[in-house]
Image (cartoon, coloured by chain):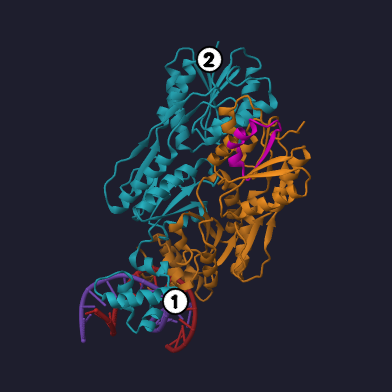
Chain colours: A orange, B cyan, C red, D purple
Amino acid sequence: MVSIKDIAKQARVSISTVSYALNGSPKVTDETTARILAIAKELNYVPNAAARSLKTRETKIIGVFLTDFSGAFYGDLLQGTKEILTQKGYDLIVCSGKQSHRMLPERMIDGAIILDETFGNEQLLSYADRGHKLVVLDRELSHSNINQVLLDNKAGAMLAAEYLIEQGHRKLYVVTGPNGSYDSKQRLQAVTQVVERTAGAQLIVIEGDFNKAAGERAAERIMADSNSGLVSSAVFCFNDEMAIGMFNYLSEHHPNVKIGEQIHIIGFDNMELASYTQPRLSTIDYSKRKWGALAAEQLIKLISGDTVEHERIYVTLIKGCSVGSEK
Amino acid sequence: MVSIKDIAKQARVSISTVSYALNGSPKVTDETTARILAIAKELNYVPNAAARSLKTRETKIIGVFLTDFSGAFYGDLLQGTKEILTQKGYDLIVCSGKQSHRMLPERMIDGAIILDETFGNEQLLSYADRGHKLVVLDRELSHSNINQVLLDNKAGAMLAAEYLIEQGHRKLYVVTGPNGSYDSKQRLQAVTQVVERTAGAQLIVIEGDFNKAAGERAAERIMADSNSGLVSSAVFCFNDEMAIGMFNYLSEHHPNVKIGEQIHIIGFDNMELASYTQPRLSTIDYSKRKWGALAAEQLIKLISGDTVEHERIYVTLIKGCSVGSEK
DNA sequence: TTGTAGGCGTTATCAT
DNA sequence: ATGATAACGCCTACAA
C-alpha cells in the first residue's frame, strides 16, 4: 500500500508537506503541490479511510438501516436520500440486520436514518446519548440528537376509513401490521376514532404483519365470516402488500367473488404493484422519494449542529376500483 | 469517546492487558479479564472501527455495488448475499453511485460484488491489481483477484427465442438493454443465432435501456410498423421492466389490441410484477437469491486465498399467456 | 501474568 | 514555505 510517506520520499519533501499539498493548503507552493500531485497520481496513491477518520473523527458516510432488502418499497426512498446526501458531500450505505447495527457505535458512519423495528428504542437513545445523530422514520423518540420524519399515519388512516364509510360500508375490517409497529398502532387508533363516531359502524381487527401471507390469511378469515352474512365487507389493509396477498387469495380460492363489489379493499403505501392489480387497488399515497430526501436533510442539519423541528410527510387518497359502494 | 485507555485507568492495568482481555487472550487471568470486561460494559466501551482496521487492515465488511436502488429487482439477490455473509462473519453494505466507488480503494470494505455498469473495466482491473477482491455479476473479466458469477444469458435468450419460433412466430422484435450492457449483448447474440438458423424468420432490433419508458417507446414503434402488415408481431424484451412498459403503452393507446393474440411478448427476469400482469407475462426465470448467495461465497473464498472457478446461474422458461401461437 | 513501546496512515501543531 | 513531531485508538512483539 502506498502512503504519503512513499510520496514524501519520492518527492524529497516531508510527509507534512505532502499532506498539505494533497489537501490543497495554500501553505505549499503551487509548484511543489503540482509535483506532489503528479507523483501521487503516478504511484496510484489513495488515502486510507481508516487513518483519516481515526484522526478527523468523521467518515462522511451516512447509513440507512432497513428491516430487509425487499426493495420494492424502498427504492424511491433511497434514491431521494442519495440525491440529497451526494449534494452535501456525503456517501450513503444501506444496511440491514442486527449485525450491522455496530456501524453506528463503532463510528463507521457519521449518522443514521432508521426504518427498522429491530432497533430498540433504548438502544437508539443510548446511541444518541453518546452523541450519535439519528433520524427515525418509524417511531417517536425525543432526544436532542434525534429527529423524526414520520408519515402522517392518522390522516392516511382517516382518509381510508372515511372513504369506506362514505361508500356506505359499515362493517369494516382492518388488517394490522406486526405488534410493535408504530405506523400500525397510529393507523389503528385513527380508524377506531372514525368508526366510533359513525353510527352503526363496526370494526373488526385482524392482526397482520405487513407481509403478503398475512393478507391471504386475513382474506380466508373474512370469507369464512361473510359466508353467513348478507352485508358485503370492506377491508382496510394497513399496507399494500397485505392487500395484494388478499387479492391473490381471492382470485385463487374465490374466483367468483368480485373485488369492488362483494368485497372492498383499500391499502396503504401505493406501491408500484398497486397500479397493476385488477381492479386497481385503492390506497394511500405519499412521496417516498421526498420522505427519504427530507430525512437526509434533517440528518445533515443535526450533524451540522443546527436545531431541527420534527417533520411530517403528507398523504393523499387514491381511489381505485377495489372499493365500490354498498348497495 | 471511551477507549481502552479509559478502561485501563479504571482497572489500574495497562492498555495492553485491556486489549488482550477484550480479545479473549489466554495470557490474562480469567479474573482480571472478567473485571476488565465488566468495566468495559459499564463504561459503554465500543471499539473504534477505524483504529482497528488501520491495524488489522480489514473491516469485515463487503460492499455490493448497484446501478440504482430501484430495488424491485435486487431484493432477493441482496437477501441471498446477506445470509451467506452473516454466516461467514461479514457485514454487508449496499452502495450506489460513482461517489461510493471510493469505498474499495480506501479500504473501507474487504471486497466487492459488482452489478453496476458505471464501473469501468479498467477501473476494476486496476483495483484487482492492487490486491482488492472482486466478484462481478455483469461482465467478463479475467484476473486472479476477480471471480465471475454470470447469468446464463445465452441459454435464456435461446429459450425465449425458440419459444416464440415454436409458437409459429417468424417476425421477431427484440428490445435490447443499454449499449454497454454485457447481458444485453449476450442475449442479442443468442437470439441472432436462433433466428439465423430458422428459415423465414426475421429479426428486428430495437434499442432499449432496461427501463419501462424504453418498452413504451418500442411498443409505439412496433404498433406503427404493424399497422400496415397482417402478420402478428412477437417481441422479446430483454428484461421484464421494458415488457411491463410495453403492456402499459398498449393498454393505454391500443386497448383493443390483445396481448397474446395480436401481439406476443416475452420478458427476462421474472420479477414479481410479472405474475400480476394481465395476461401473465412469459419470461425467463432464475433464482436471484441464489445468484447473490453464490457471489458472496465466491468472494469469501477469494478473500481467504482459495482458488475459485467462475460460476454460472441457470435459467428456465416461464410460459405465461402473453405469448400465444401464430394462426 | 502484566507492562512497555512501536507502528498502522493521517492530520495538525509547532518550530524552523 | 517546509519539516519534525505528537496525537488518533488499537494491536502485538518483546521485556519484565
Of all residues, the one furthest to the top in this rendering is B327
Kindly tell me whether residue A6 is visible in this rendering. no
Task: Name the kind of residue labelled 1 in the image.
Answer: Val
Q: Is residue A241 magenta?
A: yes
Residue B325: which disc?
2
On the image, numbered disc 1 is attached to which residue?
B2
Q: x, y percentage for residue B240?
A: 53, 32
Mark 1 chain: B
Residue A195: which disc?
none
Within the image, what quadrant is residue B109 found in? bottom left
Task: Report, in whole angstroms, how far the alpha carbon at label 2 lies from the one at label 1.
Answer: 72 Å
Range shown magenta: A221-243
Front of the two marks 2 and 1 = 1
Which residue is pictured at 37% across the width and 65% down the height?
Answer: B53
Of all residues, the one furthest to the front in this rendering is A228
Mark 2 chain: B
Q: Are marks 2 and 1 in contact (CB under 8 Å)?
A: no
Other-residue count near label 1 (Cα within 10 Å), few / some / many at <14 / 14–19 / ≥20? some
Q: x, y percentage for residue B118?
A: 49, 46
Pick the residue in front: A164 or A291.
Answer: A164
Which residue is pictured at 46% across the width and 20% down the height?
Answer: B163
Task: Name the kind of residue labelled 2 in the image.
Answer: Ser
Q: Is residue B91 left or right of residue B172?
A: left
Q: Is residue B160 magenta?
A: no
Q: x, y percentage for residue B102?
A: 46, 57
* Label 1 element class: loop
Which residue is pictured at 51% across the width and 31% down the height?
Answer: B238
Q: Earlier in the sequence, mark 2 or mark 1?
A: 1
